[in-house]
Image (cartoon, rainbow, N blue to C red):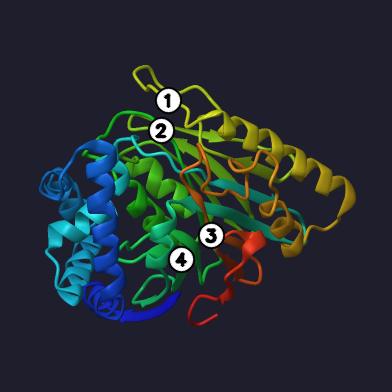
Amino acid sequence: MRKVNCSGMPFEIGVQHGRQAREEIHSSLAFYTELYQRKSKMDWNTASHRAEEFIPVLEKDWPDYVEEIKGVGEGSDLPFTTILAMNIRTEISMGMFSDGCTSFAWKTDDVSLLAQNWDWEEPQQNNLIYLNITQNGKPSISMITEAGLIGKIGMNSAGVGVCLNAIRARGVDYGRLPVHLALRATLDSNSRLEAIAKLEKAGVAAAAHLLIADSTGTTSIEFSHRDLVKIGTSDGRICHSNHFLVEHADGVSETVFGQDSRDRMVKATKLLQGAAEREKPPTVQTIQKMLEDEEGYPGAINRAALGASSTATSFGIVMELKSKTAKVRIGRPTQCKGTMLLRPPGV
């Protein structure tokens, strides 16, 4: 996995990202061009036009993200609207694609752990990058992202981490913040509470679940294009898969990815409960073991692309937010292709 280091003002950061990851960005564009056509019968011009509908709210409320996306386009020799369309892939698909991710959080007096397996179609694994960003006036960031996307899964120098679960529910609000830019807004925050306040104010444009944590605790938030609902916990342990766990506003229509999402949620809950009975405090290795679970294979927490399951685990990450470090295993955790240690610049 290519490591990309960027620093400076937003446009400069984008240019460095685009230049260093040019090969992966072009490959990612080819992947999504084919995927949109195969899954949605949508060509890239149509996708780009749909992306343009977000420009007014982004220019008004999130100009730094516009500049960074422009920089990625400049550095990779691609149009701004192409990079923008890649960054709003969740909204373009409107819930028509089915990936399967399972996330965990566990907070005690001693540790604050945040983790997930990110599952997607296998060819896109080659287009993942390890992106470090040092920026003026904001925390530095270390994340695993798809090349060209300026927000994804990771943590920052303030000890704020975020994980993502896709949810298949129709509806897009072009006046709200796109999902992957909501991830970036979280990583640009100095605390979990600051991140939540931003997202409550901005709203998120399409359905998703974000698990946001820092050393003080964890917040599980389900978003639709019409509302957000926080899911509480009394024991410091939270997990989530790919369907809504709570009721949402009228007009929000969900299509569950499949029975395996419900099955993974049941198994993840059991894993957390069982580990809590055995291990105090939990460790990074405790959570890594959970990410290896294959019950329900191939549609398991440790997912494989086989039969009815079209996606596989591309990487697993476990963040320890007090020490501000994360361990990443590339590929399925039981067939690991390599490991990485993430640490935000300056930590």
**How many tags in the picture?**
4
Would residue 188 be visible to someone looking at this image? no
Which label sits in the foreground, 3 or 1? Answer: 1
When asked about the image quadrant of residue 227, the answer is top left
Return the residue nearer the eye: 156 or 31: 31
In the rendered structure, which disc, 3 or 1, sits on the residue that comes first in sequence?
3
Q: Position of residue 17 (x, y in %)?
A: 29, 75
**Is residue 146 visible in this depiction of the protein?**
yes
The residue under label 1 is 255
Q: Residues within 10 Å of mark 1 (few under 14, many from 20)?
A: few
Q: Position of residue 190 (x, y in %)?
A: 47, 63
- SS label for mark 1: loop
Q: Nearer the viewer, residue 317 or 196?
A: 317
Earlier in the chain: of badge 3 and badge 2, it is: 3
Judged from the image, the secondary structure of the residue bearing numbered disc 2 is: loop
Q: Residue tagged by mark 2?
A: 168
Q: CA distance from mark 3 to mark 2?
A: 23 Å
